[in-house]
Amino acid sequence: DQQVKQNSPSLSVQEGRISILNCDYTNSMFDYFLWYKKYPAEGPTFLISISSIKDKNEDGRFTVFLNKSAKHLSLHIVPSQPGDSAVYFCAASFNAGNNRKLIWGLGTSLAVNP
Amino acid sequence: DTGVSQDPRHKITKRGQNVTFRCDPISEHNRLYWYRQTLGQGPEFLTYFQNEAQLEKSRLLSDRFSAERPKGSFSTLEIQRTEQGDSAMYLCASSFQRGGYEQFFGPGTRLTVL
């Protein structure tokens, strides 16, 4: 049972345009959401996060939007650059006793074409 | 470089051999996580340390896997009697309990079992 779903395995965007990556979740216990970027043969790199008490967080070209009622979040990259080409993972966090757990989506592979 | 480091970056071994990986977290981080990732999947949680205490171990982790963090700093993950199904990227992450909920990942160790 996939609690964090990234329904688009891949996305292709032209350089300079907006990239929108989507993520849906099912567990109401999640109270913090994170986006990670991963290049081949490297570990995930933290990109941006949002608390469940907010609906938007912006950091430079990256903005994350959270719609709690729809249990949906999205990552917007504007403008997209070829160096943004990577796999993007959505992760949801909740407090599990002694542990702060992260539940991961399967990732969306973004290709930004020059 | 003050990020999470892992050693080795790549390991090729024959089935049945034992392997050990090392992770050095960010120095002020007291939480340390081990994950495993295969192609097309998000990171899969293996185990978690808070300081030197191993507080959680995934039910998916067989008895052939053991992890230690003897002084609450670096950690080792050992796999005994490796099997071909153990081939994966092994990721280490760290976080600071009183910080945000972000986990910061190392570059990973790519294990290939022949």
Image: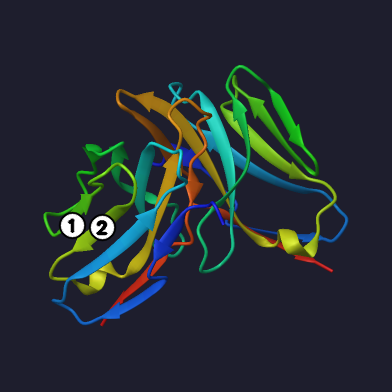
Q: Pointer 1: residues within 10 angstroms few (<14), some, or many (20+)?
A: some
Query: What amino acid type should be assigned to the residue bearing mark 1?
Result: Phe
Q: Which residue is mark 2?
A: B77
Compared to residue B10, the image places residue A92 above or below, namely above
- Which of the two discs, 2 and 1, labels the residue nearer the N terminus? 1
Element under disc 2? strand
Whether tag 2 and tag 1 are in contact, CB under 8 A, the answer is yes
x, y percentage for residue B59? Answer: 19, 44
Residue A1 at least partly seen: no
x, y percentage for residue B77? Answer: 25, 57
Compared to residue B9, the image places residue A96 above or below, namely above
Q: Nearer the viewer, residue B77 or A56?
A: B77
Q: Residue at x 57, y 37 (%)?
A: A34
Q: Residue furthest right?
A: A16
Q: Quadrant of residue B27?
A: top left
Q: Residue at x 19, y 72 (%)?
A: B83
Q: Quadrant of residue B17?
A: bottom left
The reply to whether label 2 and label 1 mark residues of one chain is yes
x, y percentage for residue A32? Answer: 53, 27
**Chain bearing mark 1:** B
Q: Which residue is mark 1?
A: B65
Q: Quadrant of residue B21?
A: bottom left
What is the spatial separation of the Cα atoms under label 2 and label 1, in whole angstroms?
7 Å
Q: Quadrant of the C terminus of chain A?
A: bottom right
Element under disc 1? strand
Q: Is residue B82 left or right of residue B112?
A: left
Q: Is residue A18 left or right of residue B77?
A: right
Viewer-side label of 2, 1? 2
Query: What amino acid type should be assigned to the residue bearing mark 2?
Result: Leu
Q: Residue at x 44, y 38 (%)?
A: B29
